[in-house]
Image: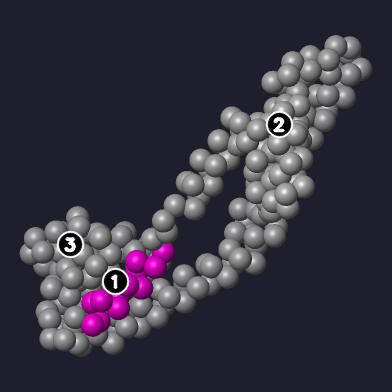
Amino acid sequence: MAEMLLISAAMLAGVDFRALALLAAALLFPVWALAACLLHVVRNRTSTEGDGVLFCQAVARELRAGATLRDSLHAGALLVDRVDLAAAIADSGRLGDVSSRLSAAFPELSPELGLVVGAVSNTGTAAAPLFEELGDVALATVELSEEVRVATAPARASALVLIGLPLAFIAHQTSTGRIGDLLATPGQRLLALTGLALVVVGLVLSIIFVRRVS
């Protein structure tokens, strides 16, 4: 009762619907709300997608300033806080030996980055324009990924509602002990198990569809 009074007071006070929904979820389903918050934090942790862009731009800038390829790669790795990679670049005998590590560190540029470093270290060709082009490629990749994420946001939100509501109902019924009432008689048990199976199938299909479009 106290929870409903608090939610009603917040509604009358004009609290935003999204904040109100979070408040209701935290009050009525605290464990599930905490799990959802943790999932949100994990999925939205600091992204490193733009590191490849910054790395290539830094390397090109250092090369145009007259630095060697090794020093330029080292400075670029430090700029994006890849200390281990910077140490490997500084300690390597040949830059071609770290090309695979560079590709692994920046998967959005793999395998082009490793090939460019290997080729430039062997031939000594002008590398600044190549790294500028790689930076443009990485930037285009990041922008395309962001556009796809924004475009699929409504579909992912709809799937979350369609998935979350049945799961919340099942969790509520289980936590209150009412799930046993649904399984009291053979007829109810059949309907309940059929409904649960449909929910599970819908959950699996929704996850598959969301992962494909994102």
Q: CA distance from mark 3 to mark 2?
A: 54 Å
What residue range appears in magenta? 49-61
Q: Is residue 158 above or below residue 168?
A: below
Question: Would residue 192 be visible to someone looking at this image?
Answer: yes
Element carrying mark 2? helix
**Residue lying at 40% horizontally and 73% vertically, measured from the top left:** 138
Q: CA distance from mark 1 to mark 3?
A: 11 Å
Residue at x 77% of width, y 19% of height: 179
Does the magenta portion include 60? yes
Residue 43 point in image, percent of width and height: 50, 50
Please name the residue that numbered disc 2 is placed on.
3
- Towards the viewer: 111 or 204: 204
Q: Which badge, 3 or 2, is on the more N-terminal residue?
A: 2
Please give left or right for residue 63 compared with residue 181 in the image.
left
Q: Residue at x 20, y 57 (%)?
A: 83
Q: Is residue 184 above or below residue 96?
A: above
